[in-house]
Image (cartoon, rainbow, N blue to C red):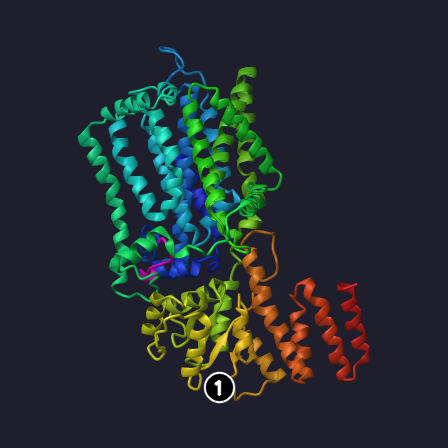
C-alpha cells in the first residue's frame, strides 16, 4: 500500500500547488455556487457532483471556490492511483505473475520492476497529461475527474473479477458504480458501455471469449452463449444487481426535490415530470449547436489534435503515442489480449462519440476538451504496456542487477517528463482574471443596478460573488441568452421582486429588455457588458461608456460628468491582474478573451464615443490605454484616430508618430 499512497500524495501535492487561484470562467462559478448552495446547475444537473461538492464545502478549507476545487483534486489523484492498480493487474496477467502463471507449477521469473515501474510510468503520464491536470485544478473539472474516477472503478472491478471470490461481488459492484457514473454524467457512461460489456464477457469464466466471438455471425448461437454466461449468475443475483444499479440513480431525485424549494439557481426548474426529463436528457440544448456535417467533424478533429499533439509535453507526446501503440499491439498478441482490447474500446468509444455526436458552434470548440481525458488515459495505459515490454526485452538480454537499476532510473525520469513539460501550462495558480472581472463589474455600478450579461463569461463571476460570497446582493445580473425561459424569469423576479414584467406570448430578448427598461429605467440604472453583446442591444438603446460597462441612456443616474479624471479614478479602482499571456495553455483562451473584450474594447469604444462627441482629451486617454492590450488587427485604426486627435489638440509631431504607427500595422 505504500506505493499507491505515495503516488496519491505526490499527485495531490502537485495539484494543490498548481490549482486555480480563484475559479475558471468555464462554468466554474456556477459549479461552485451549485455545490455551496445546493442549487441546480445546467443540464443534466450533475446531482452526484452537486452533493459530493456540498460535502467538500463543509471542510474548513479557505473559500468555497477552493473547497470545490479540492474535490476535483481528490478525485483526480484517486483516478491516477486506480490507473496504476489497473496497469499492474494487466501486467501481472500478461507476464504470468498474477492469477494465471504461464505454466502450472512454474514459478514466476519476471522481476517486480516490470510491474511497478511501467505501472507508475503510465499513471504519472496520465496524472500530468494536460487535460487531466487542468481538470484536477479547477472547480468545473471535478465533474470530469469524478467521471474518470467512476469509470476506472468499473474497469478495476472488471479486471479484478477474474480473481477467486470476486465474480459474484463484481456482479453487484459493477452496476453500482455504473449507476453512480450515470448519476454524474450519463452520456459519458453510455459511450463507455461497450467497453464494460466486452471486459465483462472477457472476464467471466463460464464461456470463453473466443467462443462468444465465433458465434457472432450466428445470432441464435450467440444468444445461447450469452444465456449461458448469465445463467451462471442466477436470477436472484441478477435482480440484486439491478437493485444495486437503481440505488445510485435515485440521486436524480435531488433535482425535483430541490427545485420545489426554488433555489436562486434553478436551471430548467425540474419540478414537473416534463422538465425533469428534459433536464436529464439535455433536451434544453436541442437546436443550439452547429448543423451536423463534414464541417463539424473536421472542426471536432481539429480541436482534438490542437490539444492532443502536446498532451504529455512538447515532442514527448509523440514518444508516448508511439510507445502506447507498440505496447497495445504487443498486448493484443498475448494470451491476455482481451483486457488490452477492452481499454482500446473504452478510449476509442469515447473518441468516436465526441467526434460524431458533438456539434459546438464556432468559438465553443473548447467544450470538447473535457471529454477527451479517457482517450489520453488509454494512451497512458498503452505506454505502461510498452515500457513493460521494453523492460522484458532488456532483462532477457542483460541479466545483471545494473540493468534493473538503470531501467528504474530511466523509467522514473520518463515518468516525470510530463510533469516538467506541462507545469507552466497547467499552473493555474495565477488565474484570477475571472474573479477580478466580477469584482470590477460590481465596483462600476451604483446601488440597485441591473447588469445585462451576454453569456457565461460575464454572468458566472457575478453569480459566484453575489450568491456565494454575498457581495452586492442589490445588483441584478440578467442573462440575455436564457431570459426567454419562464423557469429563469420566475427565479429572477422572485429573487429581485422589484423587477416585474408582464408575460408575453412571444418573448424574444429584445422585447423583454425593452419592457424592463421602459418599466424600470426611471428608477433603476441599466448596464450591459462587451461580452458577446448582441448587436440589437447597443443599436436599440442609446448608451454611454462607463468604465468597463455601458450604461443605457434612458435609465437612472446619468447626472455625472464624463471626464478623464473620473475615468482615471474609476479605472484606478479596478483589479486587473495576471492578464499577460504565460506559457500557452487552454485556460489562456479565457484570459485572452477577458483582456480583449472586457478591458481593451471597453477603452477602445470609450475613445470612439469621446471622439464622436468632441471630447479629445478623453478619447486620447482611452485610446492610449486600449493600445496596451489591443489585438494587432485593431491597432491601425486606433493609431489613425489617435493621430487625428493629436491634430485637434495642435500636437503635430505626435500626430505624425501615430500615423506612422498606423502604417506599420496596415502597410
Q: Position of residue 390 (x, y in %)?
A: 54, 23
Vertical relation: 78 (above or below) 88: below
Closest to the observer, 142 or 41:
41
Q: Is residue 25 left or right of residue 470?
A: right
Which residue is depicted at the point 32% across and 56% down?
54
Q: Position of residue 591 (x, y in %)?
A: 56, 60
Q: Is residue 10 left or right of residue 594?
A: left
Q: Is residue 643 magenta?
A: no
Residue 626 visible in the current orientation: yes
Outermost residue toward the front in this view: 505
Query: In which quadrant will I find the C terminus?
Result: bottom right
Q: Which residues are magenta?
A: 36-44
Vertical relation: 142 (above or below) 100: below
Q: Position of residue 530 (x, y in %)?
A: 55, 69
Vertical relation: 552 (above or below) 438: below
Query: In which quadrant will I find the N terminus?
Result: top left
Amino acid at each position: 500500500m505504500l506505493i499507491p499512497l505515495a503516488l496519491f500524495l505526490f499527485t495531490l501535492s502537485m495539484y494543490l500547488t498548481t490549482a486555480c487561484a480563484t475559479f475558471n470562467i468555464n462554468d466554474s462559478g456556477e459549479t461552485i455556487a451549485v455545490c455551496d448552495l445546493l442549487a441546480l446547475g445546467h443540464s443534466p444537473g450533475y446531482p452526484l457532483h452537486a452533493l459530493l461538492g456540498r460535502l467538500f464545502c463543509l471542510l474548513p478549507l479557505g473559500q468555497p471556490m477552493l473547497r470545490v476545487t479540492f474535490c476535483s483534486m481528490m478525485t483526480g489523484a484517486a483516478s491516477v492511483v486506480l490507473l496504476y492498480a489497473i496497469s499492474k493487474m494487466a501486467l501481472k496477467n500478461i507476464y504470468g505473475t498474477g492469477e494465471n502463471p504461464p505454466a502450472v507449477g512454474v514459478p514466476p521469473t519476471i522481476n517486480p520492476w516490470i510491474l511497478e515501474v511501467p505501472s507508475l510510468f503510465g499513471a504519472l503520464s496520465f496524472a500530468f497529461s494536460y487535460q487531466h491536470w487542468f481538470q484536477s485544478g479547477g472547480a468545473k473539472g471535478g465533474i470530469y475527474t469524478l467521471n474518470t474516477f467512476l469509470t476506472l472503478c468499473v474497469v478495476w472491478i472488471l479486471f479484478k473479477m477474474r480473481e477467486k471470490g470476486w465474480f459474484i461481488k463484481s456482479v453487484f459492484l459493477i452496476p453500482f458504480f455504473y449507476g453512480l457514473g450515470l448519476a454524474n454524467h450519463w452520456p459519458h457512461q453510455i459511450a463507455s458501455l461497450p467497453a464494460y460489456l466486452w471486459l465483462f464477457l472477457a472476464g467471466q469464466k463460464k464461456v470463453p471469449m473466443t467462443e462468444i466471438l465465433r458465434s457472432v455471425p450466428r445470432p441464435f448461437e450467440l444468444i445461447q452463449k450469452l444465456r449461458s454466461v448469465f445463467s451462471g449468475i442466477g436470477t436472484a443475483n441478477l435482480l440484486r444487481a439491478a437493485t444495486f444499479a437503481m440505488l445510485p440513480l435515485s440521486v436524480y431525485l435531488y433535482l425535483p426535490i430541490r427545485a420545489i424549494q426554488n433555489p436562486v439557481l434553478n436551471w430548467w426548474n425540474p419540478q414537473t415530470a416534463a422538465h425533469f426529463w428534459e433536464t436529464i436528457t439535455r433536451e434544453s440544448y436541442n437546436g443550439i449547436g452547429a448543423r451536423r456535417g463534414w464541417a463539424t467533424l473536421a472542426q471536432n478533429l481539429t480541436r482534438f489534435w490542437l490539444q492532443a499533439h502536446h498532451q504529455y509535453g512538447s515532442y514527448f507526446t509523440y514518444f508516448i503515442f508511439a510507445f502506447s501503440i507498440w505496447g497495445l499491439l504487443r498486448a493484443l498478441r498475448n494470451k491476455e489480449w482481451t483486457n488490452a482490447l477492452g481499454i482500446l474500446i473504452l478510449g476509442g468509444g469515447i473518441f468516436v462519440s465526441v467526434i460524431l455526436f458533438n456539434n459546438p458552434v464556432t468559438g465553443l470548440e473548447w467544450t470538447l476538451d473535457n471529454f477527451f481525458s479517457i482517450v489520453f488515459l488509454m494512451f497512458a495505459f498503452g505506454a505502461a504496456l510498452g515500457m513493460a515490454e521494453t523492460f522484458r526485452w532488456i532483462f532477457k538480454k542483460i541479466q545483471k542487477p545494473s540493468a534493473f537499476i538503470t531501467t528504474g532510473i530511466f523509467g522514473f525520469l520518463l515518468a516525470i517528463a510530463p510533469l516538467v513539460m506541462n507545469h507552466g501550462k497547467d499552473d493555474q495558480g495565477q488565474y484570477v482574471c475571472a474573479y477580478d472581472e466580477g469584482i470590477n463589474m460590481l465596483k462600476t455600478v451604483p446601488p440597485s443596478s441591473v447588469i445585462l450579461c451576454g453569456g457565461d463569461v460575464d454572468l458566472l463571476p457575478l453569480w459566484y460573488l453575489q450568491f456565494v460570497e454575498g457581495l452586492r446582493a442589490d445588483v441584478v445580473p440578467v442573462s440575455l441568452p436564457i431570459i426567454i425561459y419562464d423557469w429563469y424569469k420566475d427565479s429572477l423576479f422572485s429573487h429581485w421582486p422589484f423587477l416585474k414584467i408582464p408575460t408575453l406570448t412571444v418573448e424574444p430578448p429584445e422585447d423583454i429588455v425593452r419592457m424592463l427598461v421602459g418599466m424600470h429605467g426611471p428608477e433603476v440604472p441599466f448596464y450591459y457588458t462587451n461580452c458577446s453583446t448582441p448587436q440589437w442591444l447597443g443599436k436599440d438603446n442609446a448608451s454611454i461608456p462607463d468604465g468597463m460597462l455601458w450604461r443605457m441612456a434612458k435609465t437612472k443616474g446619468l447626472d455625472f460628468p464624463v471626464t478623464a479624471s473620473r475615468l482615471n479614478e474609476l479605472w484606478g479602482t479596478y483589479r486587473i491582474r495576471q492578464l499577460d499571456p504565460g506559457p500557452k495553455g487552454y485556460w489562456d483562451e479565457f484570459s485572452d478573451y477577458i483582456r480583449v473584450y472586457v478591458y481593451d474594447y471597453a477603452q477602445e469604444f470609450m475613445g470612439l464615443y469621446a471622439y464622436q462627441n468632441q471630447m479629445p482629451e478623453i478619447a486620447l486617454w482611452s485610446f492610449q490605454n486600449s493600445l496596451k492590450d489591443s489585438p494587432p488587427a485593431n491597432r491601425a485604426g486606433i493609431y489613425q484616430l489617435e493621430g487625428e486627435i493629436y491634430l485637434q489638440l495642435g500636437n503635430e509631431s505626435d500626430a505624425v508618430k501615430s500615423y506612422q504607427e498606423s502604417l506599420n500595422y496596415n502597410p
